[in-house]
Structures are given as structure tokens and as C-alpha cells.
Image: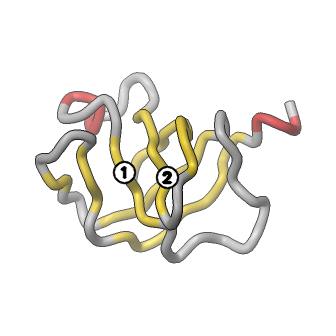
Amino acid sequence: MFQATILEIGEGFFLVEPVEGCTELNSADQITVPMKKMEASPEPEVGDVIEITYNGELLETYPAQIKEIYGIKVVQDVGKN
């Protein structure tokens, strides 16, 4: 599990940047995350911080990719600051 800031929202995926101090940041500065198993609300927006629960594997592409998602939830809503 890690937290990341949404940089871009594409068709069926998020492009995210892991937050400072995250071990994933040692492997990749940008990660593509499929929009799967998301909590119903709030709807994620660019700039929001999301928490991603996954199997721990990052595909070594650029940007990196997560294959197996267990859950995604918004932990910091940029629109509600």
C-alpha cells in the first residue's frame, strides 16, 4: 500500500506520483494505476492524494505500471482543503 498524488486521469487509469518517503518512489517517479476496486466516493480528481493497495509488484516500464489492484481510496481531496 502507498499514497500518491494524481497527475492525470486517463481513460480507465490514473497517472500518479508517489508521495515523499514512499518506497515506491525509489523505483518510479510516475506510475500508471488502473481504475479498479475504487471506493464509491469521493470521485478522485487531479491533485488529490489516493491510497493504493496492491500486490507489491511494479512493472518496469515508463511510467511504471501496477498490475494487481486490491483497492483505491481518496485520502486527501484537493477540492475540500
Residue 31 lies, in percent from the top left, at 34, 44
Label 2, secondary structure: give it.
strand
Q: In this view, does 47 lie to the left or right of 54?
A: right
Q: Is residue 11 above or below residue 10?
A: below
Residue 63 lies, in percent from the top left, at 27, 41
Find out whether the residues at labels 2 and 1 contact each other: C-beta distance under 8 Å. yes
Residue type at the position of mark 2: Phe
Q: Name the residue under label 2.
A: 14
Label 1, secondary structure: give it.
strand
Residue lying at 48% horizontally and 43% vertically, measured from the top left:
3
Residue 79 lies, in percent from the top left, at 84, 37
The front one of 58 and 3 is 58
Q: Quadrant of residue 22?
A: top left
Q: How crowded is mark 2: few (under 14 residues within 10 Å), some or many (20 or more)?
A: many
The front one of 64 and 40 is 64
The front one of 18 and 13 is 13
Residue lying at 77% horizontally and 66% vertically, measured from the top left:
41
Q: In this view, does 74 lie to the left or right of 32?
A: right
Residue lying at 42% horizontally and 65% vertically, measured from the top left:
34
Among numbered discs 2 and 1, the one appearing first in the sequence: 2
Picture quarter with the C terminus: top right
Picture quarter with the N terminus: bottom left
Q: Mark 1 points at which residue?
A: 32
Q: Which residue lies furthest to the front in this view?
A: 11
Residue type at the position of mark 1: Thr
